[in-house]
Amino acid sequence: MTTETNKNLSTETSLKAMKKFAEKYAKNTNTYFCVDPSVTAVVIEGLAKHKDELGAPLCPCRHYEDKEAEVKNTFWNCPCVPMRERKECHCMLFLTPDNDFAGEKQDISDEDLESTRKTMI
């Protein structure tokens, strides 16, 4: 990927860190990734991009007037308070087994991440 392309995507380091975090958190909380791996990949990419830009994995699926203030507030930093307290994930990254969109996986392949990233360019 070119440098210009990378401006729109997270760094590889942050992407790997968010992938590892998401997989471990799913296993620790008995939650599962979406049956559609592209949903999982887009959310992980968004978390990684926010980690690069803001220093924290702010939920990428919400609109914020002031992202820096939201990071400091920590409410929407992943895992967000609704997820930690009630296992409610707005992003559909961590789904309980009874959710209609929950898949059977608690991991995502590097290939699924990369193929989804290519569509985001």
Image (cartoon, rainbow, N blue to C red):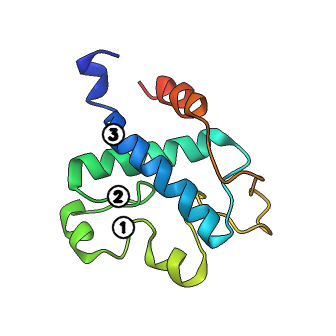
Circle 3 Cα neighbour tier, 10 Å, few/some/many (<14 / 14–19 / ≥20): few
Q: Identify the residue shown where x is 54% and y is 34%.
A: 113
Q: Nearer the viewer, residue 100 or 95?
A: 95
Alpha carbons under labels 3 and 2: distance apart: 13 Å
Q: Which residue is mark 2?
A: 57
Question: Which quarter of the figure has residue 73?
Answer: bottom left
- Pointer 1 and pointer 2: residues touching (CB < 8 Å)? yes
Identify residue for label 3: 13
**Image: 102 above or below 97:** above
- Residue at the top extreme of this rendering: 2
Q: Quadrant of the C terminus?
A: top left
Tell me, yes or no, if residue 10 can be seen here.
no
Which sits earlier in the primary sequence, circle 1 or circle 2?
A: 2
Residue bearing the label numbered 1: 77
Q: Label 2's element?
A: loop
Residue found 66% across the figure and 54% down from its top: 106
Q: In front: mark 1 or mark 3?
A: 3
